[in-house]
Amino acid sequence: MNFIQIDNEGIALEAFQVTSPNFDARPEPNDISMVVIHNISLPPQTYGGSGVIELFTNNINPQDHPYFEKIQGLKVSSHFFIRRDGSLIQFVSCCKRAWHAGQSQWKNKSRCNDFSIGIELEGSDFDAFTDKQYECLNRLIHGIKRVYPIKDVVGHSDISPGRKTDPGPFFDWQRVLVD
């Protein structure tokens, strides 16, 4: 399988780089063992706009949409964002801790941001994802696994059950090639 190359600085060479200020150092820099898959669209179920980029760079304008009033001031990010056309944006180096998972736990280990790489898919719990998104996701996971000792690929709902539902019921886990 063709993969997306990740360099020694944790940068995906094929990704468009947009720097988010919402990251910090990992407590254990060599403990990067999980990928967390999310979905996001801003405004909800609206695709192709700049809302996600604005959120992850702390530039969301609450006057642009009523929903933005609810999320203004949030300090969140993800390592990667895969648009519906399969294009890839990177906000945070894989070497750093992005703020994507929030309160979370996996296999008796809390604070999943500490040891995970977050991948946001442009989407929602109400729409199927595109073929191009799955293709990019698989190439990205394959590239990540070439550099980091990934043991688990999970959904946000798996590490924050009852609090989060993404990547949602339309995410087809059968299409994710984790081996």
Image (tube, rainbow, N blue to C red):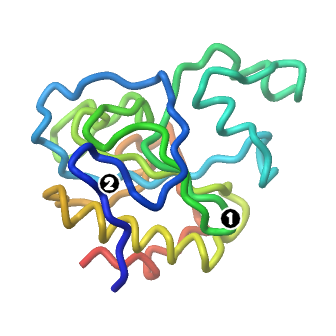
Residue ID at (32%, 54%) = 35
CB contact under 8 Å: marks 2 and 1: no
Residue 90, x across and y down, in percent: 48, 46
* Element type at mark 2: strand
* Element type at mark 1: loop
**Vertical side of 157 occupied by 60: above or below:** above
Amino acid under disc 1 = Arg
Residue 126, x across and y down, in percent: 72, 60
Which is nearer the N-term, disc 2 or disc 1? Answer: 2
Residue ID at (45%, 52%) = 119
Q: Which residue is label 2 attached to?
A: 35
Q: Which residue is label 1 attached to?
A: 84
Instruction: From the viewer's side, name the closer residue of 2 and 156.
Output: 2
Question: What is the spatial separation of the Cα atoms under label 2 and label 1, in whole angstroms?
Answer: 19 Å
Q: How many marks?
A: 2
Residue ID at (35%, 48%) = 11
Residue ID at (79%, 46%) = 49
Left or right: residue 1 versus residue 37 is left
Outermost bottom residue: 1
Residue 143, x across and y down, in percent: 30, 66
| Disc 2 crowd, CA 10 A, few/some/many (<14, 14-19, 20+) | many
Residue 8, x across and y down, in percent: 21, 49
**Vertical side of 136 occupied by 113: above or below:** above
Left or right: residue 169 versus residue 70 is left
**Vertical side of 164 occupied by 58: above or below:** above
Amino acid under disc 2 = Val
- The mark closer to the camera, 2 or 1, is 1
Left or right: residue 5 versus residue 150 is right
